[in-house]
Image: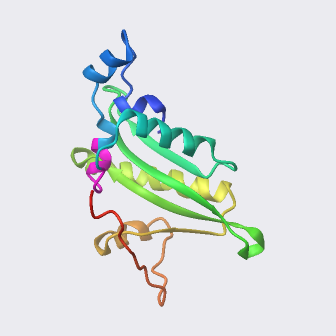
Amino acid sequence: MRPLRLTDYYNGCVLAVTMIVWQLHCSTLFLQLLADLTTVGDVSFEKFEHQFRAMQSSQPHNYYVIVVEDGRTSEIVAAATLVIELKFIHQAGCRGRVEDVVVLSSRRSLKLGVALNTCLVALAKKLSVYKLSLECKDSLIGFYEKFGYKVDAGNNFLVQRFDSKI
């Protein structure tokens, strides 16, 4: 398990001769992994790099993208993000949100989701968040309860979608 790197856009492929060769010969497996979770859309390397650098340079550091890499193939097989929100409430505390948890479908029996969640919960505690939350499908509530998450009765999750063109 490690932090996301810019080279993960091409799944860790080494720059061979030029950026063009790199782009032609390497795949975007990290984004393909995210596509197992949701719609990714068209993300060029330039878009990926811009977003990556923006996340990495946020002050204070608010984005922790963790990936699990297969040591034999260097393939990214699981990922999750911890987002830290700065608040005025709770003594100007921080709230943590777990986002984009995904495990490659062929690796779901290996307990990689357990490893990711254990890591994110420990990181959230280390960062002294007053609350850690995530949104998930009803079918996954039991899985996440193993890590201390609880359904917060009376609080509902609502959404407005603005990405209908993706």
Residue at coordinates 23% horizontally, 49% vertically from top-left? 105
Residue at the extreme front: 165
* 30 and 137: which is toward the camera: 30
In the rendered view, tell whether residue 155 sits above or below residue 55: below
In the rendered view, tell whether residue 114 sits above or below residue 72: below
Q: Is residue 52 left or right of residue 27?
A: right
Is residue 2 visible to us here? no
Residue at coordinates 44% horizontally, 84% vertically from top-left? 156
Residue at the extreme top: 17
Q: Which residues are magenta?
A: 32-40
* 50 and 3: which is toward the camera: 50
Residue 63, horizontal then vertical, whole percent:
56, 50
Residue at the extreme right: 91
| Residue 114 quadrant | bottom left
| Residue 56 quadrant | top right
* 36 and 59: which is toward the camera: 59
Residue 147, horizontal then vertical, whole percent:
48, 65
Residue at coordinates 43% horizontally, 28% vertically from top-left? 7
